[in-house]
Amino acid sequence: MFEKKTDPLISGKAFQQRMVRHLFYALTVIVVSLMLGVFGYVFLEGMRWEQALLNAATLLSGLGLSQMPQEPGAQLFASAYALLCGFVFVAVSGIVIVPILHRMLHYFHWEE
C-alpha cells in the first residue's frame, strides 16, 4: 500500500489522494459503527430513531450514555457498544495517522 524504503517520496498530490482515501475509510468505519448503534437501540430498546441516533452518537463520540436503557438486552447491548466505540476510536485514529507517520519516517529515513 505504501512505498518502500528504496522508493522515492511520493508527490504532494499523491499524498493528498492517499489522505483523502484514508479519511474516507475512517468515515466509513464511523458511519457503520453509528448505524450499528442506532439499529441496536431501535430494535432492542424500542427507541425512536432520533433518540437512538443521539444515544449512539454520544457513545461513539466518547461522551457516554445520554439515556440509560431500561431493557436488560439493551443494557447488555449498550455495554458491548461502548466497548466497540473505544476500539473504533483507536482504529480511526490509526487509519488517519498512519499515512502521515509513514511519510515522516520515509522523509527523514528513520527506518535506517
Image (cartoon, grey):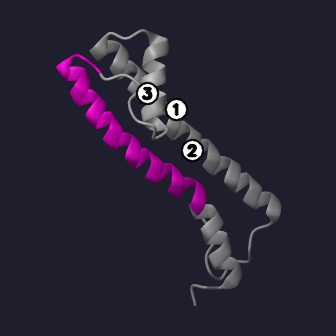
Residue under pointer 2: 25
* Three-letter amino acid code at the position of disc 2: Tyr
What numbered label is drawn on residue 56? 3
Residue range (magenta): 69-97
Residue shown at 65% from the left, 83% from the top: 6
Q: Nearer the viewer, mark 3 or mark 1?
A: 3
Q: Where is residue 98 in the image (x, y as percent from the top left)?
A: 57, 63
Mark 1 to mark 2: distance in Å? 10 Å
Magenta stretch mostly in which secondary structure?
Answer: helix
Residue type, mark 3 in image = Ala
**Residue ID at (68%, 54%):** 19
Nearer the observer, disc 2 or disc 3? 3
| Residue 1 left/right relative to 50 | right
Instruction: Assign a secondary structure to mark 2.
Output: helix
Examine the image and state in which quarter residue 107 appears: bottom right
**Can residue 67 be seen in this snapshot?**
yes
Disc with the residue nearer the chain's start (1 vs 2): 2
Dot 1 crowding, Cα within 10 Å, few <14, some 14–19, many 20+: few
Residue 90 x %, y %: 45, 53
The amino acid sitting under disc 1 is Val
